[in-house]
Amino acid sequence: MGSGPETPGSHPLRLRAVLQQIHEEDCPHVPNPPGIKKRAAVALVIRVRPTYPHQAIYDNNQCSSVAQPFQKCLDSFFSQEWVQEGDAEVLFIKRAARVGDRWTGHMALPGGKREPADSDDRATSSRETTEEIGLNLDSEHCLLIGNLPERMIKSAWGRAPLMVLCPFVYLALRHDLPPLALQPSEVHSAHWVALRGLLAPSLRTVERWDLSDGSVRQRGYFRQMITRNTAGYMLFGGIKLQPTESLYCSSPNGFILETRSPATWTESVTYMITNAFTGDRTQQVENGRSLVLWGLTMGIMADFLEMLDTHGTSKLWYWPTFSPVDLRALISLLTYRFRSQKLRELTAKTGRPGPNDVRISGYDATTFTTSVTRRSIGSESGIAGGLLLEGYFDQLFKALYVALIARFGFCLALTAFVVQRYRRRIK
């Protein structure tokens, strides 16, 4: 009896059907809006890892995308016993921590911005992957499958377009690819993660995003503390990644700590105060951030995972909110009607994208992503929240302002009550 994955959506034969569908149904091209020239591309690289006791026995024809046409290559690859009994995996990178980078330390897919020398978006995904992790996607051992929905990335809570992002799917025809070579300035580490782990409900988690990061941080430490203590953190749905294989970039300073950890509470307090003003924030991000998939990359992966297992992907959804209990309760109450309306609207099962419909997706509050889809998103979540997020953040922040005013009014009323009781006691 085989020891392959038990999660239905991650089974290699189910994966083959999904890859076939992606190849046959190209997603439409999303043009740049006026005044925005930036485009970027990422690579979703999939491999199948042999499971015990099945050993990978390679045939030159079965592991070459050059020796045979696409259909024969795909069929012959998945006809191998070790592939059918194997465990499908996806390659993620953890971005290096850089001051001013909105995605610093995040889990991502390899890729980057398009350069003038790139012939098209696919060439960008290949070039950037080679530069960042040393994996040559143009080699005969990698098969280009197709593309996922292109996205219009917007910042400032969806108000200003930044660029168009184009995800491409590749299949590694060998699991023993050449060793990765990580670029220290771009990549902190690389991780192979099983598809069944991405679909497992037990690995669902909530990612906290610090509202005081970014521009607020540059305005001062106390402004950062006020923002954090007032609104707390934003909470987003995420997946805790459990890699089957990892590679870390060990060349940067700080990979191996050269100083001992504080031994006493006085040393800890002194370290915290000193580091808050003079410490290396980038190293904190690299060492402190766990391997959690969320935000923009989770939106891309949800597009892919939905094709594998619609029911499992629906459990990815988590309405973004804030961490303080009072804010969360008031926001839940004030946005209930909006959320209920969205869920009623999105009842049809989703399909591959078509040219006439637009979708907002993604979990990152500061990075909206608009992509194209054939029809309305279905299930309780849709793909990466899908159209559910369209207009949600406007409602969220209206509710936040009302909640903060209510909190302020409650504090004033409580203060007035205490003062009045104190005066009565004095009299």
Image (cartoon, rainbow, N blue to C red):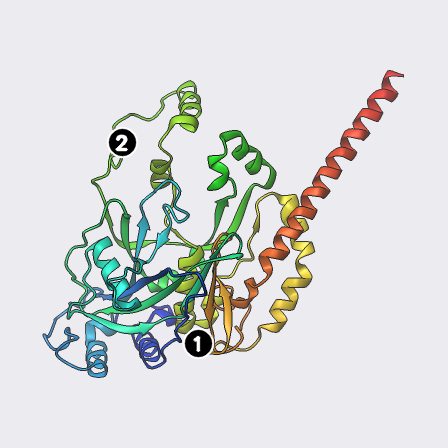
Q: Residues within 10 Å of mark 1 (few under 14, many from 20)?
A: many
Q: Is residue 410 above or below residue 400?
A: above
- Amino acid on which the number 1 mark rests in the picture: Pro
* Residue 102 image point, x, y percent: 42, 47
Identify the element where label 2 is drawn: loop
Pair 2/1: label in front: 1
Identify the element where label 1 is drawn: loop
Query: In this figure, which residue is indicated by the disc labeled 1?
Result: 353
Residue 286 left/right relative to 410 = left
Query: In this figure, which residue is indicated by the disc labeled 2?
Result: 257
- Amino acid on which the number 2 mark rests in the picture: Leu
Which residue lies at the image location 31% right of the left edge and 74% below the top edge? 146
The C terminus sits in image quarter: top right
Q: Is residue 106 above or below residue 362?
A: above
Which residue lies at the image location 28% right of the left edge and 54% below the top edge? 191
Quarter occupied by residue 340: bottom right
Q: Residue furthest right?
A: 427
Residue 426 shows up from this direction = yes
Residue 415 left/right relative to 358 = right
Which of the pair 55/327 is nearer the observer? 327
* Residue 279 image point, x, y percent: 37, 29
Quarter occupied by residue 43: bottom left
Residue 139 left/right relative to 293 = left
